[in-house]
Amino acid sequence: MRNSRNIWPLLGALVLLAGCRQDMHDQPRFKPLAMSDFYSDLRSARTPVEGTVARGQLHEDTYLYTGKIGNNPGDYIPFPVTEEVLARGEQRFNIYCAPCHSRLGDGNGMIVQRGYRQPPSYHTERLRKAPLGYFFDVMSNGFGAMPDYASQIPPRDRWDIVAYIRALQLSQNATASDLPTGQQVPSVPPAYRGEPGSGATMPEMAAPREKTEESK
């Protein structure tokens, strides 16, 4: 009696296995790049239809993805620059760019202080006059010792960084005449400006300023 009880689950499993079909496993198929005599060119992998574009790779807006007009870098951001764009650009800049370029953009980042080749300062005359598309192109394709960041930073974020770089350049090279009427910029100690010989370090530059009698 005990043996008959044990055989029923086994019979049930055999019935279930017999009902399984292997159509999906045994269907005719080709291995990738295998030769096939079905086609005249003997290739099992077929050439995509002319004009086929991979999903998400249409890139109709050429300037958005290259920063160039023809072969030359353009000088505009391909979307409105808002406060959110600059905030995103600052965040991405501090993650990907500041280690070499520093948060001031003077090329004296922490990696450079550890011996890596120093990049040029964003505040040189040449780079202050460089078209915006130039910075996008360098981030996309690299330049000199700088590798490309196309795989790490999406195109939209690259443009956000470009917008922030230009804002950073303006912040370090603005004059009193650039201010709106009636506004003044308070004086900033050398340590907060990161001037040579100020002894400022990265934590000091990021630390909040102490309140003055005027601001209390």
Image (cartoon, helix red, strand yellow):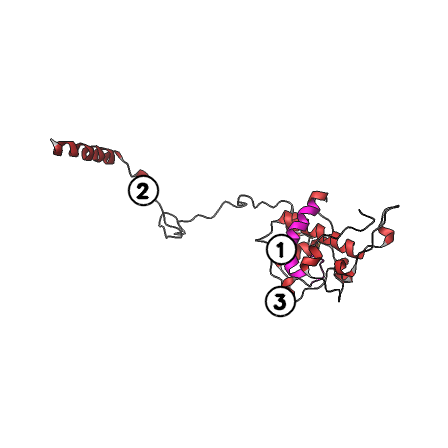
34 up-or-down from 144: above or below:
above
Q: Give the range drawn in magenta.
A: 85-107
Give the residue type at disc 1: Tyr
The residue lying at 70 percent from left, 54 percent from top is 207
Q: Is mark 2 on a helix, strand or loop?
A: helix
169 inside magenta stretch: no
Between disc 2 and disc 1, the foreground one is 1
Q: Where is residue 114 in the image (x, y as percent from the top left)?
A: 62, 67
Label 3: which residue?
A: 114
Q: How far apart are marks 3 and 2 (CA)?
A: 57 Å
Kind of residue at badge 3? Arg
The part of the image, by quadrant, that contains residue 10 is top left
Q: Name the residue under label 2.
A: 25
Q: Which amino acid lies under the numbered mark 2 shown in the image of this protein?
A: His
Crowdedness near tag 3: few (<14), some (14–19) or many (≥20) residues, C-alpha within 10 Å: few
| Secondary element at image label 3 | loop
* x and y percentages locating residue 184 in the rendered image: 85, 49
Residue at 65% over, 45% down:
61
